[in-house]
């Protein structure tokens, strides 16, 4: 049997935590209290306020900052994919090193290569999310350029344009968050290279850290402070 029972349970736990966390954060009422969802509200407020402004250079600078940050993560994910695939060339040496660790377990070459390919898939998923987020931010920049002048701020068409822009910006932010979430879970996935039991621990640790940042961190509390 290629996968042992602990491997199957640990991998199932990893996937369940990733999907479960994403579902709670994006599709439940409780998730609307998270930091990500609260920022969506401010994206809409940003576009409505921009509609009232004549000078929009600051808004263009904010968009450039968002695009640059997304491009950085997209490039990083490609580098991570290349680095992960390079690990396949040193499989035998790495198996020997990991097996000597205190919690390391013996593994076969095929199983190790499957783990490496799985990690590469996670980074490929992250790249697609970041690349699409970058493209969406380009669309948002175009929408900002087409924003009606402030003299038309009360025009229904102008307000609809601002709402469309905010929804597009919200979609870009959502895909960026998914890519960043993949990065975090990739760190938890690394525990599997040592042992399935460590994968349980690292996955749980990642979920706890991200949950804290979304709901109980200083940043989250600052968004609800009076």
Image (spheres, rainbow, N blue to C red):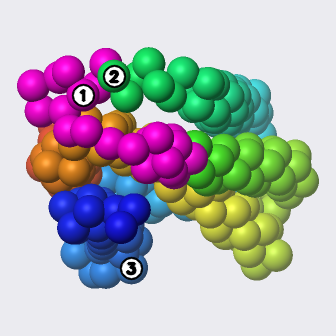
Q: Residues within 10 Å of mark 3 (few under 14, many from 20)?
A: few
Q: Is residue 49 visible?
A: no
Residue in view at x 67 percent, y 28 percent: 82
Q: Residues within 10 Å of mark 2 (few under 14, many from 20)?
A: few
Residue in view at x 20 percent, y 21 percent: 100
* Majority secondary structure in the magenta region: helix
Could you tell which of marks 2 and 3 lies nearer the N-terminus?
Answer: 3
225 on left or right of 33: left
Q: Residues within 10 Å of mark 1 (few under 14, many from 20)?
A: some
| Highlighted range, magenta | 97-119
User: Disc 1 and disc 3: Cα gap in Å?
Assistant: 41 Å
Residue identified by numbered label 2: 96
Could you tell which of marks 1 and 3 lies nearer the N-terminus?
Answer: 3
Q: How many marks?
A: 3
40 versus 119 height, above or below: below
Rendered location of residue 47, percent (x, y): 64, 54
User: Disc 1 and disc 2: Cα gap in Å?
Assistant: 5 Å
Residue identified by numbered label 1: 99
103 on left or right of 214: left
User: In this orientation, which residue lies closer to the viewer: 126 or 163?
Assistant: 126
Rendered location of residue 124, percent (x, y): 64, 47
Residue identified by numbered label 3: 27
Residue in view at x 52 percent, y 43 percent: 113
Rendered location of residue 155, percent (x, y): 78, 73
Q: Nearer the viewer, mark 2 or mark 3?
A: 2
Secondary structure category for the residue under label 3? helix
């Amino acid at each position: 049997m290629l996968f042992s029972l602990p491997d199957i349970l640990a991998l199932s736990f990893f996937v369940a935590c990733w999907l479960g966390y994403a579902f709670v954060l994006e599709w439940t009422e409780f998730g609307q209290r998270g930091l990500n969802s609260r920022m969506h509200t401010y994206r809409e407020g940003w576009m409505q306020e921009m509609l009232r402004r004549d000078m929009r250079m600051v808004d263009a600078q904010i968009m450039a900052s968002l695009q640059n940050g997304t491009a950085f993560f997209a490039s990083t994910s490609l580098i991570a994919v290349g680095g992960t695939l390079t690990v396949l060339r040193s499989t035998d040496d790495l198996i020997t090193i990991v097996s000597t660790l205190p919690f390391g377990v013996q593994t076969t070459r095929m199983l190790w290569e499957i783990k490496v390919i799985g990690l590469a898939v996670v980074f490929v998923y992250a790249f697609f999310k970041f690349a699409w987020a970058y493209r969406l931010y380009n669309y948002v920049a175009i929408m900002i350029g087409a924003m009606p002048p402030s003299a038309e701020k009360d025009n229904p068409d102008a307000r609809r344009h601002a709402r469309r822009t905010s929804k597009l910006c919200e979609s870009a932010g959502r895909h960026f968050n998914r890519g960043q979430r993949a990065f975090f879970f990739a760190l938890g996935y690394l525990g599997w290279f040592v042992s399935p039991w460590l994968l349980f621990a690292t996955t749980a640790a990642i979920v706890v850290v991200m949950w804290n940042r979304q709901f109980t961190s200083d940043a989250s509390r600052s968004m609800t402070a009076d």
